[in-house]
Every structure is written in structure tokens, then in C-alpha cells.
Amino acid sequence: MPNSILSRTPKPKYDVVLIGGGIMSATLATLLHEFDPGLEIAIFERLGRFAKESTAAWNNAGTGHSAFCELNYTPENEDGTIDISKAEKIAEQFEISKQFWSYLVDKKYISTPSDFINSCAHMSLVFGERDAEYLKKRHEAMKDSPLFSAMEFSTDHNQLREWIPLVMNKRNEAEVLAATKMDLGTDVNFGSLTRKMGRHLLEDSNVEVFLYHEVKDIDPREDGKWEMKVKDRIHSHKQEVVADFVFIGAGGYALPLLESSEIKESEGYGGFPVSGEWLVTHNPELVEKHQAKVYTQATVDAPPMSVPHLDLRIIDGEKALLFGPFAGFSTKFLKEGNYLDLPASVNTKNIKSLFGAWWHNIPLTKYLVQQVAMTKAQRIQHLREFVKDAKEEDWELKVAGQRVQIIKKDEKHGGKLEFGTEVVVNKQGTIASLLGASPGASTAVFAMINVLEKCFPEKLNGEWREKLLEMIPSYGQKLAENPELTEKIRAYSKEKLELKY
């Protein structure tokens, strides 16, 4: 890292300020710079490198969320039919990400796609007759959509042994299993991707990047602009920076910063921090027998983000397997945060939401307590539901990223716990924030275009439109209703991203 980056002093005024150096801010900065290279943009990141929190490779599962394997995106209706509408939305959003990354590669803004994205089959695996019947119905519903037409289904042990030999080793022949498989799936190192975008912004644009700079407060001004208190964490220097537009992409710290802005839209929001752990193995013999991401059903009373899965990961060219996640709890809002983050976030405007969400999620609290109390041996026992002969010495525990789940006002319960990703924007469209977790990074491009739609609608429909369609050829069209377009854009991203399926 050049010393000039660390010694640079922010200007007093910018057109755009982006808070946080993760996938969201890097994506939004890149989009804005493409639309208008003359914009004066600053990114403030409190740590010494881009993508050190939720975006870091081992702080998430690296799943290019395409709804190929995540069963919670395809609920069963009361009449027994399967609702695939959410799955189609998530799949379309990830295709938007792939198109944008393909554009960056095509323009030579970033290189070597295999550093950040690799083909990896996505599978759903269920146990027992009831879940096998559900998975069969799910497959029947999904294969008719252009987005999932290549999905395979099997209950045959011989076929499953070809797909997932590690999981099928030492299985009882009488055991009922069912699986679906999509070879179009990917493993994504969002940390590597973000740093590639960051390097492009640093070297080939006028976007100014400030590492070890933390935005502590955001205040509205009478002229409609925003005034921020920015702390240089190396030199302990504080200064005020003004911007016309502010985006808060600070992970768990987005919530307190949004609250400090005092916009009406932030009222009632609270945050519930959840940490996690993986079991990880680098044993080449085990890795060779499992070349997929395999998701199953969440256990009773477990939240959606706790769905057990056994995944291939490819990080810095090295293959590994992870199993989890196992939930943990910390009052920090970031992995490198402060234990006072949670209590400090409570205020008169959100305490009703927080209490209501807690009161109506007591089973979740019980689940978290049980998870936190688990020993490594108990975690290995859970792994053995997937890998019958798993040996404790082959696996190590690795702490995953810190997530802050959204708590929103709810008329019925006072507060409601949300497990998705949400964009909050003020009425004037001058400040926006991203809250929540999964599918998060996978849908970063869709989320940031959503920010632009809400905050710069006239430009997006006017002078920026042509560039937007160059970057995202499918923009404004539903892939689920257009097989030809789906095939065309997937062929394009397969070539540019050098995917092998």
C-alpha cells in the first residue's frame, strides 16, 4: 500500500461519500464513476484494507446465491404447491452481478476472474421420504423456469455417489435421500473481487480512497447537504467533510450511522448481532471427494441463516471444505467492533421494536444459547450427518463474520426480525444505507442499482441509461420470462468470467 494513501487528507467537500470499503461501496463507486467520471467521490474505510469484514472470504460462505440450492427461497404453500417466485428474483439478481463483473473484465478494469469466481455445482440434499417428496415437487416447479431448466434431480444412490462421494461414503443403502444439482453454480471470493475493484478505482479513476478513516457521525445541513465527522485513526485527527449524497455501506455499523442522520425513514430500526463459526478442512483427500456446495433443510426453530451446508471453497487458489454455520453471539456489530455496540444502539425510537422482536423470537434465543454452548466434538457430530466418518483431527474451527440482522417496527408484534437485505433511503434521495445480511454480497450490483433508481432516477432513465444497458444488458427485463435472453447473458458471462460448467 503506497504511503501516499495513508498520508492523504480528505477535501472538505465531495459530490458523493461512501462509508465502508466492502463489496457494496466498491460496487456503487465503480457504477457512479462509469456513469459520470467527473464526480468527486470519496470512500472512507475504518480498517487498513478493503473487504476485511463481512466481505472477507472466510467471513461468508462464498455462495454465489442463485437460489439453486437454498431451500428457504422456495417455500411450500398450504395447498402443497411450491412458490418459486423468490428463487427467481434471487437468481435474476445474481445474473445482474455476473453481467457487471463480465463488463469489468471486458473493459480490463479487473483481470484473472478465477481469482474471485469459479464454477462449483450447487446442490440441495434432503433426508427422509417427506423431504424427498418436497424436493421432487420443488424440482418439478423449478425446471419449467428458464433460470432453473438445467436442474437435475435424483434419489438413486449410485447417481448420488457420483455427485457427492464424500457424503455418500458409508451410507446405508436403505436410507432415503434426494438431491438436486445445478452445474451453473459458483464459488465467489468477494474479498478478492472487492480489492480488484478497489485497485481499479485507486489507480484508474479520480475516486479518493481513505483507509483507517472512520465516519463517526452524520448530520443534515439546512442546505440539504450532509456533514460528517471523520476520524483519521492513524493520526488521531478529526475533520468535517460535506457531501451532496451519502451511502452507508458499513456492515453492522450502518445502523448507528443511519440513526445519527436522524432521517424519518430510520426510525424504529434495530439490530440483532449474530456471529458464526465454520468447521474447515484443507485435507486434500477429503476435498477431492466433494466438489460442490450442498445445502439442506434448517432444523426446527433455527433461523434461515443457519441452514447446514457442506461447501467447496476456493480461496487464493487453494481448495478447502467448510461446514456450518454454527451460530454464535457477540454484542459487537462488526468482527473488529466494540462490545458496547448493541447496548449503544438502543434508543427510545427502537426499544419497542427490539423488545417485540425478542419476545416473539424466544425459540431463536434458545437456539443461539444452545449453539454457543456447543463443544467442537458436538459440532463434529452434526458434521457426521453429512460426512459419516468425519474425524475431529481433520477439521478446525474458524470464526465467520459478524452479521447484524434487521429489526423493524411491526404493528402486530411491536418489532419483527428480518433475515434479508434492505435499502433505506430518505425522501429526498440524498442518503441511502444498506442493512441486513444474506444474500447480501451476491446481489450487491442489484442492490446498488436499486440505490441509484431511488436516488438518481432522472439520470438513470436519462443520460446514464445507455451506459447502464452496456453494463447490464438484461436491465429492465425479466429473465424468468425470456429463455433466449437468459441463455444469451449466461453464455456471455460464462465466456468473460471463464466459468467451466
Image: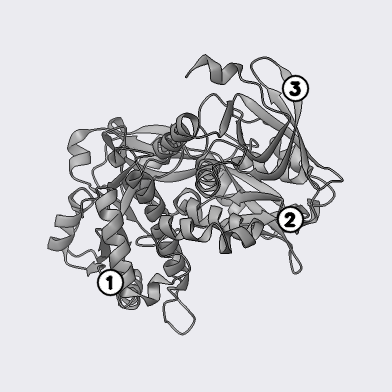
Q: What x and y, as percent, mark residue 280?
A: 34, 36
Q: Residue 28 location, x and y as percent? A: 54, 46
Q: Amino acid at mark 3?
A: Lys
Tell me the residue that label 3 is attached to: 238
| Dot placed on the residue nearer the N-terminal end, 2 or 3 | 3
Note whether residue 170 is visible: no
Q: Residue at x 46, y 85 (%)?
A: 79
In the depicted structure, whether residue 337 falls above or below residue 290: above
- Residue toward you, 18 or 305: 18
Q: Residue at x 40, y 33 (%)?
A: 397
- Give amino acid for label 1: Ser
> Splitting the image into 4 quarters, where does residue 339 fall?
top right
Q: Separation of disc 3 and disc 1 at Cα?
A: 55 Å
Kindly identify which numbered label has been placed on residue 199: none
Of mark 2 and mark 1, the one earlier in the sequence is 1
Inter-mark Cα distance, 2 to 1: 40 Å
In the image, is 268 to the left or to the right of 54?
right
Rendered position, 466 above or below 382 = below
Q: Which residue does the numbered mark 2 point to in the structure image? A: 426
User: Within 10 angstroms of label 1, few (less than 14), some, or many (20 or more) residues?
Assistant: some
Please state if 342 lies on the left or on the right of 120 as rendered. right
3 and 1 marks in contact (CB < 8 Å): no
SS at mark 3 in the image: strand
Q: Residue furthest right?
A: 222
Where's residue 324, x and y in %?
40, 45
Name the residue rendered at 23%, 33% in the picture: 283
Q: Which residue is mark 1?
A: 149
